[in-house]
Image: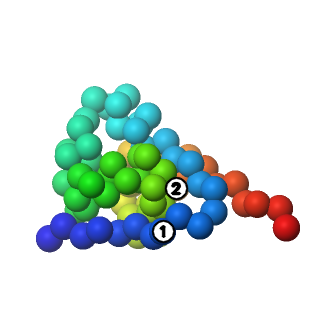
């Protein structure tokens, strides 16, 4: 079963998904299948249109054998 697990973007969060994926020479479709989401979800994450849910962030980090913090770069706005 393929799920879409992303949230609407609210804060400034960049990610290194495309960089890590390209370094391993895997397609968006291959990554999507590995973490049980659609290719469109991977496209949206890489383009910064959406932020991953905690569960999806964990799956992606586990896939790349790294930490969530190494993939998702969060910058909180100062109040």
Quadrant of res 17: top left
Q: Residue furthest right?
A: 79
Residue shown at the point (52%, 47%) measured from the top left: 15
State the image quarter where residue 33 is shown.
Answer: bottom left
Q: Residues within 10 Å of mark 1 (few under 14, many from 20)?
A: few
Would you identify the image quadrant in which residue 49 lies?
bottom left
Residue 67: tell me if it is visible: no
Q: Position of residue 25 (x, y in %)?
A: 28, 29
Mark 2 Cα-neighbour bin, 10 Å: few <14, some 14–19, many ≥20: some
Question: Residue at 25% of width from left, 61% of height from top?
Answer: 37
Q: Secondary structure at mark 1?
A: strand
Way the structure is coloured: rainbow
Left or right: where does residue 68 sit relative to residue 35? right
- How many marks overall? 2
The image's mark for residue 68 is: 2
How far from the left and from the top, in percent, is residue 77? 76, 60
Residue 39 relative to residue 45: left or right? left
54 lies left or right of 5 = right
From the image, tell me which residue sits under label 1. Answer: 8
Residue 56 in sight from this viewpoint: yes
């Amino acid at each position: 079963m393929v799920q879409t697990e992303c949230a609407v973007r609210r804060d400034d969060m960049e990610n290194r998904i495309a960089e890590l994926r390209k370094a391993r020479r895997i397609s968006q479709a291959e990554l999507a299948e590995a973490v049980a989401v659609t290719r469109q979800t991977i496209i949206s994450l890489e383009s910064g249109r959406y932020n991953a849910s905690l569960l999806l962030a964990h799956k992606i980090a586990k896939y790349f054998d790294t930490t969530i913090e190494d993939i998702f770069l969060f910058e909180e706005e100062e109040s």
